Image: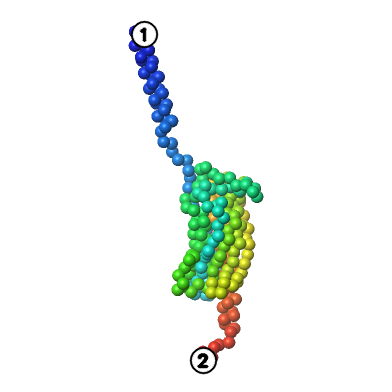
Amino acid sequence: MTTTRLTRSLLALWIATAASACSVLAPRPDPSRFYVLTALAEPSATERADAAQRGIGSLQVGVGPIAFPDYLETARMQTRMGNNRVEFSDIDRWAEPLSQGFRRALTEDLKRLLVNAIVVEYPWSPNLPVAYQVKIDLLRLERTDKGEAELVARWGVFDPKTGAVLYGEESTVNRSAAGPDTDSAVHALSEVIAELSHQIASAIDAQAAKDAARAASAPAAPGKR
């Protein structure tokens, strides 16, 4: 009788141990959450008026190359904790390389703002008569421990034929996130990209207006009067 009880006790202990081991080794759900940047820019009344004057397809803009810092080239979302420290999330991740998401959102923003223009990404076909080239050196694009999204970039508008700098700027753009959650932070990051796009579009519109005025005031070539 004693032997039978001992056997049953050992069997019960073995079953409990096996069940515990199975629960430990069983696959657990991945807690990772994946995010993408979104184009948010909308043209102002002035930008729409400029677009109406220049007509459909009369302006060709090339975007790139874009230099991106190596520390941002990771799927893990970053939070700037100070001038010299960043933290990487173990859960919040980018669904695509951040450099690719930035380029995609910026290009789409510019297409929305430069209404009627043709906007292409670098490298483009040499047969496309690009009038203005936008080069960007991105320095920061991240959320901060203060609940903000921050973008810092050096950028310029160039003549792609001569390489001449037509306009240059260093932009710092900050937006407060609507809430402490990651969705709000990503939306704020999309907003700072949209603001940078507005600055670039305004510079291109201003340069296009200057070039159009210069062309209109130039004396006509012989035989074309």
Which is nearer the eye, 120 or 147?
Answer: 120
Which is nearer the eye, 100 or 213?
Answer: 100
Kindly identify the amino acid type of the residue bearing the numbered disc 1: Thr
Looking at the image, is 81 positioned above or below residue 138? above
Please tell me how crowded label 2 is: few (under 14), some (14-19), or many (20+) other residues with Cα within 10 Å: few
Kindly identify the amino acid type of the residue bearing the numbered disc 2: Gly
Which is nearer the eye, 80 or 36?
Answer: 80
The numbered mark at residue 223 is 2
What residue is shown at x 54% (from left), y 51% (from top)? 186
- Residue 25: image x %, image y %? 42, 32
Please tell me how crowded label 1 is: few (under 14), some (14-19), or many (20+) other residues with Cα within 10 Å: few
Q: Secondary structure at mark 1?
A: helix
What residue is shown at x 58% (from left), y 61% (from top)? 137
What residue is shown at x 57% (from left), y 82% (from top)? 216
Q: Which residue is mark 1?
A: 2
Q: Residue furthest right?
A: 83
- Residue 80: image x %, image y %? 61, 48
Residue 112, visible in the rendered structure: no
Residue 179 falls left or right of residue 119? right
What residue is shown at x 49% (from left), y 67% (from top)? 119
Judged by depth in the image, the label closer to the viewer, 1 or 2, is: 1
Q: Secondary structure at mark 2?
A: loop
Cα separation, mark 1 vs mark 2, equals 120 Å
